[in-house]
Image (spheres, rainbow, N blue to C red):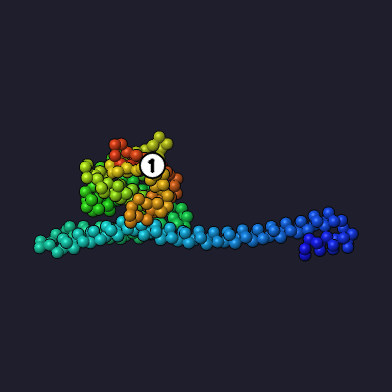
């Protein structure tokens, strides 16, 4: 019904023109409100679909990124094992060690996929007590072949005694592995000094475990530092830009922090905090 018809109908019923206009305004406002509500619901539905697709893309990219390291280790150790078997004087012990590392890397890839799926579903990390010193040694063993291949030395200053953390061991090891590989990549073009990754652990004044991964590479410029934890931001030609974003999500899910800062005189320091377990 138009505004004119509403006024005429109201006049026929003895209702004043002003009241009729007010009545028409209420009808118009109600209709507009309904249209706005419908548009809002459609927009929310569209956003939900986009969010689901985005999460699927991120999960796919995350899995591809995170299992790349175990798969690379499998390829390297497989080639090493075959070489030891094909030598004129076979070294069965070295071959056995290489194939044992393949089993460990393949098992780890499965753990990584399950942990990332849980994280994508916003599930709480699988919290348990574990020794961070032992966890760091396991990560270094996984990255050993690639670090040797790139002529990168590792120096560790771990916690002086067994230090128990409270968290998801696999996810936190994945954070550490990402930081070590990033440190190695940051030194890829260095030719005038030895390539060194240093890993240190200490307890903060607030009682948290602080773990630092330092390199003596090219460092971060201000623009890169500003966006380094953004999803899909990367400085690598073949990078996906998911590694550090995932790392920060994992650390924050544990109630900790992850940040980067320049290292003097060269390189970058990445550090993160994780809650310690009660004695």
Quarter of the figure with residue 100: bottom left
Please, which residue is most extreme toward the right here?
14
Front residue of 177 and 237: 237
Residue at (77% x, 63% y) in the render? 2
- Between 265 and 6, the one lying in front of the other is 6
Q: Position of residue 25 (x, y in %)?
A: 76, 56
For image coordinates 27% across by 57% down, the residue present is 73
The picture places residue 157, in percent across and down from the top left corner, at: 28, 40
Residue tagged 1 = 222
Q: Secondary structure at mark 1?
A: helix
The residue at the far left in this view is 88
In the visual, does 156 lie left or right of 229? left
Q: Is residue 173 visible?
A: no
Residue drawn 16% across the image and 60% down it: 84
Q: Relative to the observer, which residue lies in front, 81 or 193?
A: 193
Left or right, 278 with reference to 1: left
The answer to whether one can see residue 32 in this image is yes
- Which image quarter: residue 193? top left
In the image: residue 47, left or right of residue 8: left
Residue drawn at (74%, 58%) of the image: 28
Position of 137 with respect to 58 (left or right) is left
Q: Position of residue 142 (x, y in %)?
A: 28, 53
């Amino acid at each position: 019904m138009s505004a004119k018809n509403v006024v005429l109908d109201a006049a026929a019923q003895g209702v004043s023109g002003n009241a009729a206009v007010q009545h028409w305004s209420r009808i118009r406002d109600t209709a507009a409100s309904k249209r706005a509500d419908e548009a809002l619901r459609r927009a929310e539905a569209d956003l939900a679909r986009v969010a689901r697709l985005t999460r699927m893309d991120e999960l796919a990219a995350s899995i591809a990124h995170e299992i790349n390291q175990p798969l690379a280790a499998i390829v390297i150790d497989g080639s090493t094992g075959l070489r030891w078997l094909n030598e004129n004087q076979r070294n069965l012990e070295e071959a056995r060690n290489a194939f044992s590392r393949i089993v460990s890397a393949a098992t780890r890839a499965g753990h990584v996929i399950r942990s990332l799926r849980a994280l994508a579903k916003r599930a709480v990390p699988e919290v348990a007590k574990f020794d961070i010193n032992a966890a760091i040694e396991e990560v270094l063993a996984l990255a050993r072949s690639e670090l040797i291949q790139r002529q990168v030395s590792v120096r560790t200053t771990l916690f002086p005694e067994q230090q128990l953390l409270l968290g998801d061991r696999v996810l936190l090891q994945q954070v550490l592995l990402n930081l070590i590989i990033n440190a190695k990549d940051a030194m890829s073009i260095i030719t005038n000094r030895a390539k060194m990754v240093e890993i240190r652990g200490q307890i903060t004044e607030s009682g948290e475990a602080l773990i630092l991964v330092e390199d003596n590479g090219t460092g971060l410029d201000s623009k890169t530092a500003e966006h380094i934890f953004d999803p899909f931001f990367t400085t690598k030609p073949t990078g996906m830009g998911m590694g550090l974003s995932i790392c920060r999500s994992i650390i924050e899910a544990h109630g900790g922090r992850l940040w980067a800062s320049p290292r003097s005189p060269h390189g970058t320091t990445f550090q993160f905090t994780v809650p310690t377990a009660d004695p």
